């Protein structure tokens, strides 16, 4: 899969690396902005106590 992605990207190696860095940043931003808060709302409150 990674080889197919690498072959699909245009340009020389440095451009491909730059594109991959930007794509990874976009995916991480989307996860932190929308996916993780949505999953947190589904899980509900987690109460944890250490010792009594």
Image (tube, rainbow, N blue to C red):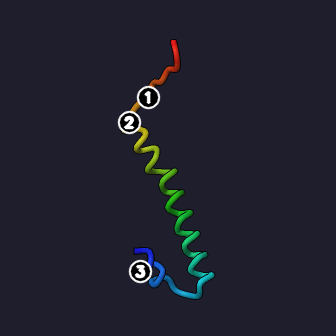
**Mark 1, residues whose alpha carbon is within 10 Å: few (<14), some, or many (≥20)?**
few
Mark 3–mark 1 CB contact (< 8 Å):
no
Disc 3, SS: helix
Where residue 28 sits in the image (x, y, percent)? 52, 58
Q: Earlier in the sequence, mark 3 or mark 1?
A: 3
Q: Residue at x 51, y 12 (%)?
A: 52
- Assign a secondary structure to mark 2: helix
From the viewer's side, name the closer residue of 3 and 39: 3
Disc nearer the start of the sequence (3/2): 3
Q: CA distance from mark 2 to mark 1?
A: 8 Å
Name the residue carrying label 2. 43
Of all residues, the one furthest to the top in this rendering is: 52
Mark 3 highlights which residue?
Answer: 4
Q: Which corner quadrant holds the N terminus?
A: bottom left
Residues 3 and 5: in front is: 3
From the viewer's perspective, is the residue at label 3 or at label 2 nearer?
3
Circle number at residue 46: 1
Kindly identify the residue that appears in the image at 44 percent across and 79 percent down: 3
Q: Residue at x 56, y 87 (%)?
A: 11
Badge 2 vs badge 1, beta-carbon distance below 8 Å = yes
Q: How far apart are labels 3 and 2 at the CA level?
A: 36 Å
Relative to 48, 22 lies left or right: right
Q: Is residue 38 above or below residue 1?
A: above
Q: Of the residues tagged 3 and 1, which is closer to the observer?
A: 3
Residue 30 picture location, percent across and down: 49, 57
Q: CA distance from mark 3 to mark 1?
A: 41 Å
> Residue 7, image x and y in percent?
46, 84
Single out the residue that lies furthest toward the right: 14
Categorize mark 3 by other alpha carbons within 10 Å: few (<14), some (14-19), many (20+): few
Residue 40: quadrant of the picture: top left
């Amino acid at each position: 899969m990674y080889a197919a992605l690498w072959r699909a990207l245009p340009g020389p190696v440095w451009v491909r690396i730059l594109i991959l860095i930007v794509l990874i940043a976009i995916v991480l931003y989307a996860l932190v902005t929308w996916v993780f808060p949505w999953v947190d709302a589904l899980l509900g409150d987690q109460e944890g106590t250490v010792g009594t």
